[in-house]
Amino acid sequence: MTDIIRNIVQRKISRRSALTAFGAGASYLAMPWVARAADDTIRIGFPTPLTGPFAAEAKDQVKSAELAVKQFNDKGGIGGRKIELLVRDDKLNGGEAATRTLELIEKDKVHAVVGSLSSAVQLAVNEVTRARGVLYVSISQSDTINEVKDFSKYTFHEALNPTMTAGAVARHTFKKGSKVAYLSADYAYGHEMLRGFKRAQAAIGAESVGEILHPFGAADYSTFMPRLRSMRPDILCISNFGRDQANSIKQAVDFGMKQQMKIVVPVLLHNQRLAVGPDVFEGVVGGANYYWGLENQIPTAKAFNDAYRAANGGAIPTDYGAYGYTGLYSLLLAMQAAGGTDTDKVIIALEGLKYDVAKGPQRYRKCDHQSVQSVLVLESKKKADMKNDMDLFQVVANEAASEDVLRSCTELGFPA
């Protein structure tokens, strides 16, 4: 899996290689349409890594996506047509994701695809969907997917991107003159978050004192900690995901790093905080797309939370889980506005959509189809301050939706 992800990161997958990886002929590239099954069901493909180190976040995405489908179906579907969610395990592997996506399109005749939980794997999904003329709403952070070389009219990005996330965290933790050290995962997610932090760092006037890349899925970070400590930073930025986040923060704490520097992460993960407890994460600051505590200020967050609790035995939705809801819901709203599943009509509806389904106002920017939305900055609470087991974070800031925090369309390679 690591080799495939690295290959995707190091070079853009060509349309031909993405398809031939699973035995499709190059002739597919000349066919921007797919014959649909005769029944009236609206089928949405949902590839996500149900196995592997991101499985907890992926399973939360599925639960939230299922909730969106249920809510639409309970109201009669779209124009009387019921919606079906077809979940597939992409195993956090670019080749597997491409295989499953092509099967969803060719065999299952899906009308659109939503999903992915890797910045690299989503590029493999995107290669297949855009070559086949199928709508794809990505729900994993990526800067690359918005750039002109990977973008297509079929590509929409519901998730935050690293420029937005790392930028928000930096604006609320870095100061002019801050000395910052970086520990980043050596694949697309880590590289893009590192770039996002450095972009914000330059604007703020902070100083980088060093950076270390670690392999994906590393269990032992002990060799990195003395080197990071010797850099004497004020702030340590740890940019990784899933179990890597829990393991690296725990070992940084074991080495006494929190006594000498502030630890920040681009994305503060609900599931990883639960996995290792409040003491390890206490005081760690990070970004987020969603936190259930928004229900005290945002009516749609409360409605989402209440519906999720009712469907999941009182459990609350998580950050990355919420992407499954907002990504699928926005697509279904566009299909409703378009009066069905005609791809060109749904694209027009998505480009004009203004939606608030869980966290406040959102909309897709036309040039790159990036969802313009709020960005949360959270701080992990100490145990004594928690009101209950789910009272994990304090909201430090809620940056309002704005194109000002995005890279410009021209910077992404689009015409001025």
Image (spheres, rainbow, N blue to C red):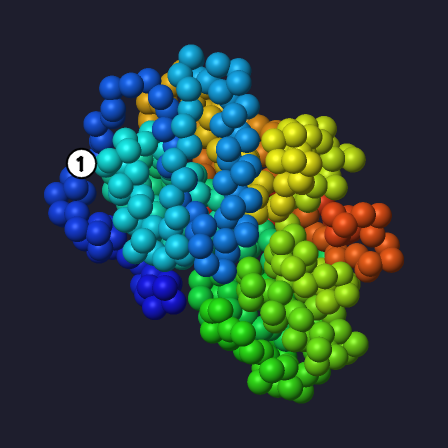
Q: Is residue 146 above or below residue 280?
A: above
Indicate the quadrant containing the C terminus: top left, top right, bottom left or bottom right. Answer: top left
Front-most of residues 145 and 42: 42
145 left or right of 31? right
Count of marks placed on residues: 1
Q: Residue at x 60, y 69 (%)?
A: 247
Give coordinates of residue 337: x percent, y percent: 46, 18
Give coordinates of residue 173: x percent, y percent: 73, 62
Front-most of residues 247 and 395: 247
Give coordinates of residue 220: x percent, y percent: 56, 78
Give coordinates of residue 15: x percent, y percent: 24, 50
Disc 1: CA contacts within 10 A as few (<14), some (14-19) or many (>=20): few
Q: Residue at x 51, y 73 (%)?
A: 218
- Residue 415 showing in the rendered view: no
Give the farthest residue toward the front.
Answer: 313
Q: Residue at x 55, y 37 (%)?
A: 64
Amino acid at the residue labelled 1? Met
Q: Residue at x 21, y 52 (%)?
A: 22
Q: Is residue 126 above or below residue 238?
A: above
- Residue 281 showing in the rendered view: yes
Image quarter of residue 202: bottom right
Indicate the quadrant containing the N terminus: top left, top right, bottom left or bottom right. Answer: bottom left
Q: Is residue 61 above or below residue 200?
A: above
89 left or right of 197? left
Image quarter of residue 118: bottom left
User: Element at badge 1?
Assistant: loop
Residue bearing mark 1:
31
